[in-house]
Amino acid sequence: MAHCLGPTLLLLLLLLLLGSASWAAGNRCVDAAEACTADSRCQQLRAQYVAQCLGRAAEGGCPRSRCRRALRLFFARGPPAHTLALLFCPCASPTCAERRRQTFVPTCAFSRPGAAPPSCLEPRDACERSRVCRPRLLAFQASCVPAPGAPDGCLRGQGARCLRAYAGLVGTAVTPNYVDNSSARVAPWCDCGASGNRREDCEAFRGLFTRNPCLDGAIRAFDRMWSPVLQRKLDSHQDPKPSFMQILKFEHLCSESHPNEVKLENPSLGSRKVQEIIA
């Protein structure tokens, strides 16, 4: 929790995570971070995962399970317009891309510093045994099925559900992230080099992320919709939330009924149900 850290350390950690807008002009990940800061709920939830994922890591330890839970809580309870903007902020420079890649603290959330990535079958199998991860992975597979011939690779209205299902995987055994600083490719922290005679299965799983026209198209569509509105609101020093949400048109799309979707943002859920979802 944020109160576990001294105020100076927490401020330094937040600056490391978000950067400074004074020198990062044009960095849209910083724009997204500023929009989150302007929303009290988003900022509070972000401070919680920063404290869990970075605070103790800075002291020499990483409580991975608590870090992952705080990340799931961020997406379960945070305003989706802001949480998705942090997750999918578009970048045109390596500096921005590295900040985006580090936003959700990969060294604590899923990777092992200095270690080679495991076979993708390892996190996939761990996910299938997890009551938290398995329904989220199924929701992602169902929501991001490519539609050949569709302009953005998805059926109409499917892109929003795909992004929300993708975000639902953050903080699980198959947490996806950007794979480098020169592209918008995403994948879990794994590869298929050591998969032996199961390499085909491994490549098929990794391809859900790296060769998915619907996911790629949904990310591009999100970029086109949110960036101009976000920048205008930041420039006018107003709360970006109301118009931002209306222009995105993602909130009502994501709340539509979907038989295989894990609902992470339903305000009618009681606290017990929310705890079951993020546990």
Image (cartoon, helix red, strand yellow):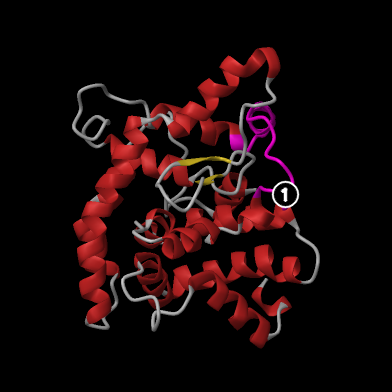
In terms of depth relative to the viewer, which is nearer, 60 or 116?
116
Residue drawn 43% across and 52% down?
268
Residue at 46% across / 29% down in the picture?
Answer: 208
Q: Position of residue 103 (x, y in %)?
A: 52, 61
Q: Is residue 231 left or right of residue 3?
A: left
Q: Position of residue 35 (x, y in %)?
A: 36, 72
24 to 46, vertically: above or below = below
Q: Residue 209: x, y in percent?
A: 46, 34
**Is 265 displayed left or right of 227 in the figure?**
right
Q: Quick one: which residue is furthest to the top in this view?
A: 197
Above or below: residue 158 compared with residue 179 = above
- The mark total stands at 1
Q: Do we see residue 18 in this rendering?
A: yes
What residue sits 43% from the left and 29% below the top? 260
Give the prevailing secondary structure in the magenta stretch: loop
Estimate the x, y position of residue 141 in percent, counting from the top left. 45, 28
Q: Is residue 256 visible?
A: no
Mark 1 neighbour class, 10 Å CA radius: few under 14, some 14 to 19, many 20 or more: few
Residue at (60%, 37%) from the top-left corner?
Answer: 133
Residue lying farthest to the right in this orientation: 60
Residue 76 magenta-highlighted: no
Q: Tell me, yes or no, whether the highlighted magenta stretch contains residue 117.
A: yes
Q: Which residues are magenta?
A: 110-133
Q: Which residue carries the number 1 mark? A: 112
Identify the image quadrant of the N terminus: bottom right
The quarter holding residue 36 reads: bottom left
Q: Amino acid at mark 1?
A: Arg
Q: Nearer the viewer, residue 96 or 42?
A: 96
Residue situated in front as seen by the camera: 154 or 2: 154
